[in-house]
Amino acid sequence: MQELLEGSHPVRMCAPMVRYSKLPFRMLVRQYECDVAFTPMIIADSFVHSAKARANEFTTSEVDRPLVVQFAAKTAEEFSTAAQLVSPYCDAVDLNCGCPQRWAIKECYGCYLLNQPELVADMVRQTKCNATVPVSIKIRVSEDMRKTVELVRRAEKAGVEWITVHGRTVKQRAEPVDYDSIKQVVDSVSIPVFANGDITQASHVGDVCSRTGARGVMAARGILSNPGMFAGHSQTTLDCIQSWVDIALSTGTPFTTFHHHLMYMLEKAHSKADRQVFNTLGSIPAVLNFLESHYGIS
């Protein structure tokens, strides 16, 4: 991981996406020039106290590297203990300070932490002391950028290795990303910063890094709909679809996950009528029959 942070080319990351960025999908994007992949956000408290939660929420393999495990936590003890559990199996842990969902904020997770710079710093500091892997944080920007600057500077002082910045506020969803705010974060710290938001094609990587000074980028919706995006593909290729089918079937991916990924990947390729048919299919055999008859994929 350190070699990537200190390298010369922009680092390309696959974002932590609930339900989607699990092991099979991470295996897929790694075939298409994705440098680093994140797990979905994992609730640290449940992960620490439940063996069942650990088995359900975290799977990896020898080829699943570099890997960053992201946790939602609200105390330093939760985050530190969860980090210690996964340290032997990953390359870094990340603290989610950017989830804008109401339930998360109500439970003092995600964007709630944007207004708790002392707590975030303590969580980073304690985890750095007890875990054996680098620590990062992922944030959204605040409407008052002075709060964001205070947060990132405190996190840097506490020892965080890098920061990923989604250039939207907690209230924003589809509004344009504020790259100037990301640049302000870059200019406020001396550690690597990664830009997140509206990365939907390979050309955006260099453009955004040049505009913001970021060390690299993180993609979510763009890579979900086009896993080969970082390799320069304008939309999902048939080879990529075939690779997903092979990976999903070999790893026993649940049908809903298998199907939903294909719905995203094939959205631009389908006609409206085909999309309506495909999205209502209810079994793996039905999906495979559709793919073979329409695209020659078996």
Image (tube, rainbow, N blue to C red):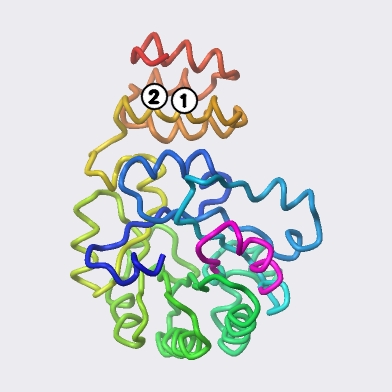
The residue shown at (38%, 27%) is 241
The residue shown at (54%, 70%) is 133
Percent coordinates x, y for residue 53 in the rendering: 75, 51
SS at mark 2 in the image: helix
The residue shown at (42%, 90%) is 146
Q: Nearer the viewer, residue 68 or 155?
A: 68
Q: Quadrant of residue 118?
A: bottom right
Q: Is residue 234 left or right of residue 172?
A: left
Q: In which quadrant of the rendered image does the N terminus lie?
A: bottom left
The residue shown at (59%, 61%) is 101
Percent coordinates x, y for residue 151 in the rendering: 49, 86
Percent coordinates x, y for residue 212 in the rendering: 25, 73
Q: Main secondary structure of the magenta part?
A: helix
SS at mark 1 in the image: helix
Q: Which mark is residue 78?
A: none
Q: In which quadrant of the rendered image does the C terminus lie?
A: top left
Q: 17 above or below 128?
A: above
Q: Please state the extent of the stretch shown in magenta in the rendering.
A: 80-94
Q: 136 above or below 119?
A: above
Q: 144 above or below 13?
A: below
Amino acid residing under circle 2: Gln
Count the marks: 2
Q: 237 above or below 164?
A: above
Disc 2, disc 1: CB below 8 Å? yes
Q: Quadrant of residue 169?
A: bottom left
Number of other residues with Cα within 10 Å of mark 2, as a class: few under 14, some 14 to 19, many 20 or more: some
Percent coordinates x, y for residue 270 in the rendering: 34, 23
Amino acid residing under circle 1: Asp
Give the residue number, with chain letter if any, for mark 2: 242
Number of other residues with Cα within 10 Å of mark 1, as a class: few under 14, some 14 to 19, many 20 or more: some
Give the residue number, with chain letter if any, for mark 1: 246
Q: Nearer the viewer, residue 111 or 82?
A: 82
